[in-house]
Image (spheres, rainbow, N blue to C red):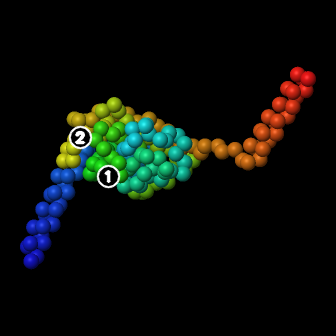
């Protein structure tokens, strides 16, 4: 019975590895502020409408197998750099199955790396430095079972360094003051015409 279960588990493991899309290799160079163990995420744009964040990512959480904040961008890979990481290379590996949470062949994907965060889940705070990586040929491979690597199949890309920023949202009193000024301006215009 034990032999049968071992054979079954080996078969299932090989079936899973064949069905997954895998890409790996060194994809990121010239990272600013990165340290050993820095968190990096491979993120797919499932609606192909562009990455839904830039410098204003404060409050967004980056975790494997989840969407980033309320956007349609899905995290398919996580890598912590090794202890030998020197600050100029980072692996961009990911292994996933197509059609998981809307991930499809030819979707654009990106790598986001946080220079000073070393955990598997990062919630961006204002002032936190991070890098966004992309290239024209960074597209999800065409079929489950594909196995591609950087730089042979994907262009290696230098990082774009950013800092998380909060987006200023006016207080209700500010809106009220603006409405009052608009009303006053309208009254003055009317009086001048009269």
The residue to which callout 2 is attached is 142
Q: Is 13 on the left-hand or right-hand side of 192?
A: left
The residue to which callout 1 is attached is 100
Outermost residue to the bottom: 1
Q: Which residue is drawn at 77% across and 47% down?
A: 173
Q: Which residue is drawn at 42% across and 51% down?
A: 67
Residue 21: horizontal and vertical position, in percent?
Answer: 24, 47
CA gap, disc 1 and disc 2: 14 Å
Q: Is 58 on the left-hand or right-hand side of 189?
A: left
| Among numbered discs 1 and 2, the one appearing first in the sequence | 1
Which quarter of the rendered picture does the C terminus lie within? top right
Question: Secondary structure beneath disc 1?
Answer: helix
Which quarter of the rendered picture does the N terminus lie within? bottom left
Residue 58 appearing in the image: yes
Q: Which residue is drawn at 90% across and 26% down?
A: 191
Mark 1 crowdedness (10 Å alpha carbons): few <14, some 14-19, many ≥20: few
Q: In which quarter of the image is residue 139?
A: top left
Residue 171: horizontal and vertical position, in percent?
Answer: 72, 47
């Amino acid at each position: 019975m034990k032999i049968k279960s071992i054979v079954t588990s080996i078969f299932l493991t090989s079936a899973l590895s064949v069905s997954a899309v895998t890409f790996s290799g060194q994809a990121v160079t010239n990272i600013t502020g990165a340290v050993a163990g820095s968190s990096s995420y491979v993120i797919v744009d499932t609606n192909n409408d562009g990455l839904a964040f830039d410098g204003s990512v404060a409050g967004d959480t980056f975790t494997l197998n989840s969407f980033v904040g309320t956007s349609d961008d899905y995290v398919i890979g996580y890598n912590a750099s090794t202890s030998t990481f020197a600050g100029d290379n980072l692996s961009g590996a990911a292994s996933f199955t197509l059609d998981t949470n809307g991930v499809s062949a030819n979707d654009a994907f990106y790598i986001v790396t946080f220079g000073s965060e070393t955990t598997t889940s990062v919630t961006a705070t204002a002032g936190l430095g991070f890098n966004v990586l992309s290239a024209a040929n960074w597209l999800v491979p065409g079929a489950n079972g594909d196995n591609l690597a950087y730089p042979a199949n994907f262009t290696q890309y230098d990082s774009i360094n950013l800092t998380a920023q909060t987006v200023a949202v006016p207080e209700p009193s500010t809106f009220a003051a603006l409405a009052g000024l608009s009303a006053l301006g309208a009254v003055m215009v009317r009086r001048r015409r009269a």
